[in-house]
Amino acid sequence: MARLIRFNKPYGTLPQFTDGDGRQTLADWIDLPGVYPAGRLDRDSEGLMLLTDDGRLQARIADPRHKLAKTYWVQVEGTPEDAALAALRKGVDLKDGRTRPAKARRIAEPAGLWPRTPPIRVRKSVPDCWIELVLTEGRNRQVRRMTAAVGHPTLRLIRCRIGTWSLDGLAPGQWEQVAPG
């Protein structure tokens, strides 16, 4: 039977098991041979990663053709107006083409959110805001590029859900084996 691991990737951890430069990797948190990431999450992003030992399951989770929804909590600079959120919902033109339409809405800071180390940069003259963004594709640094394209650079990025799997109950660096669903 396929193994599936739900992991809360801390900020600064590479989404791979090895690194020639001595940076923190998944191996610093997960000592379980034979599992591999189903998708990526940038070093400067936090939150849910899924790892599996099953190639078909890995493809079903990671391949954009399957349109598995991925939900992000995004702390952005400024307060997005309705027009900026509408642009995210419609799809944003990036250098590598137009994004698929996304779900986007302003939210309160997520309850129970852990502090980030190091903390985000704070500018007293510029407010910040949290939005929830739901994507069905996974381009390189897509969330950051999308929020920047609508005038609100990302300050902090946390993936909280992939399909039916969520971050609920996992502290940064914690993992657990779950049913492949």
Image (cartoon, helix red, strand yellow):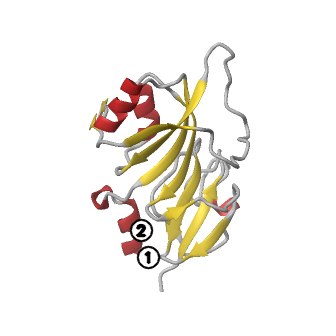
Report the quarter where the C terminus lies: bottom left
Residues under numbered marks 2 and 1 in contact, where contact means CB atoms less than 8 Å apart: yes
- Where residue 96 sits: x, y (%)? 29, 36
Q: Is residue 158 left or right of residue 163?
A: right
Q: Is residue 64 left or right of residue 53?
A: left
Residue farthest toward the top in the current orientation of the protein = 125
Q: Nearer the viewer, residue 134 or 47?
A: 134
The residue pinned by badge 2 equals: 58
Residue 83 sits above or below residue 172 on the image: above
- Element carrying mark 2: helix
Q: Residue at x 44, y 76 (%)?
A: 54
Q: How many other residues sit within 10 Å of disc 2, few (<14), some (14-19) or many (≥20)?
A: some
The picture places residue 77, in percent across and down from the top left corner, at: 55, 25
Q: Which mark is residue 54?
A: 1
- Where residue 115 sits, quadrant-wise, is top right
**Front residue of 44 and 106:** 106
